[in-house]
Image (cartoon, coloured by chain):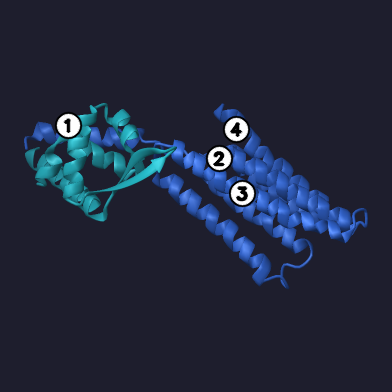
Amino acid sequence: MDDLLLSKIRIGIIAELLASDWITFSALQQRLQTTNGNLGAHLGKLIESGYVEELKAFVDRRPQSRYRLTQRGRDAFIAHVREMQAMLQGSI
Amino acid sequence: MESQDAREQLAMVETILATSSRTLCAGGEFFLVWGVLVAAMDGLNQLVADNVMPISSLWATPVLILIGVAFSVWRSMQLRAKSGRMSVLQRDYLAMMYVTMGLTFVAQFAGSNFFAGWGQAAIWNVAGAIVLLFIGLHGNRRAALAGVLLIVAMAIANYTPGMPGYVLGAGMLVGYAGFGATELLATE
């Protein structure tokens, strides 16, 4: 199983990004109901592993971070979900 | 990982995917502005064809198109900045709209011998109908109705040789701009 996706917050981030072309930090925070620091740390790990791409821009002269799921992240998520499903089927 | 954890994670993923917005934000203001502008162009062409207005007044057409383009660019940038998220469906919708409208624009110039006269005006009704019917297929009944209205207006215009510009223009005004207005009212 993908160790990186064992965290609830990280798999939540990936699931949110799966249905989005992109999402801002604040929208992600609102959806996942977590703190700035916590979300930032988890996002950092996902970016570092190449699962998520960060796009920085200035909107109304303020910096804004947007996040997008990479193909690597998508593949990892699908594999992880399949493994969890297989595990549950095996445990029945 | 324990079975209970896996169950919880799968349930959470399911909830996130189920609650993530799948509605299409059509952007009523775009339809309203372009509907009015295209209807004005159709009306102007009819007035010129009826010799009510001089042919020189057709200079207003590129100006109206430029107004529409400038508004679209400005408003798109504004909405993109305000929005916190763009769904995959919304991205696909925008791509479809740009491709449809872009190709229609190209066809007008590259195929000007095929789409001569009122054909040039009618092709915009077809392009508008494609966009509206796409939105309609994603659950917006008003859009589906407006798309059908544009096609009906084109069919009626085809059999009213005395005033095709007015009929096509009315279709754009009621179908395209009207849909935009109802979208704006619905989101308020």
Q: Tell me the residue at 66%/56% (across/down).
A: B126
Image side of residue B132 versus residue B87, left or right: right
Secondary structure of the residue carrying numbered label 3: helix
**Nearest-to-viewer mark from 3 and 4:** 3
Quadrant where the C terminus of chain B lies?
top right
Query: Closest to the observer: A38 or B160?
Result: A38
Q: Position of residue B97 (x, y in %)?
A: 54, 53
Can residue A21 be seen from the camera position used here?
A: no
Cα separation between marks 2 and 1: 37 Å
Q: Residue B114: which disc? A: none
Image side of residue B68 versus residue B9, left or right: right
Cα separation between marks 1 and 4: 40 Å
Q: Position of residue B8 (x, y in %)?
A: 17, 31
- Specify which label sits upstream in the sequence, 4 or 2: 2
- Specify which label sits upstream in the sequence, 3 or 4: 3
- Subunit ID for the residue under disc 3: B
Query: Chain B: what color?
Result: blue
Q: Are the residues flagged by discs 4 and 2 from a single subunit?
A: yes
Q: Which residue is mark 3?
A: B70
Q: Position of residue B72 (x, y in %)?
A: 58, 47
Instruction: For label 4, count other residues whose C-alpha is less than 10 Å away and answer few (under 14), some (14-19) or many (20+).
Output: some
Q: Position of residue B144 (x, y in %)?
A: 60, 43
Q: Residue B8: which disc? A: 1
- Specify which label sits upstream in the sequence, 1 or 4: 1
Q: Are the residues flagged by discs 2 and 3 from a single subunit?
A: yes
The chain coloured cyan is: A
Q: Residue B27: which disc? A: 2
- Subunit ID for the residue under disc 2: B
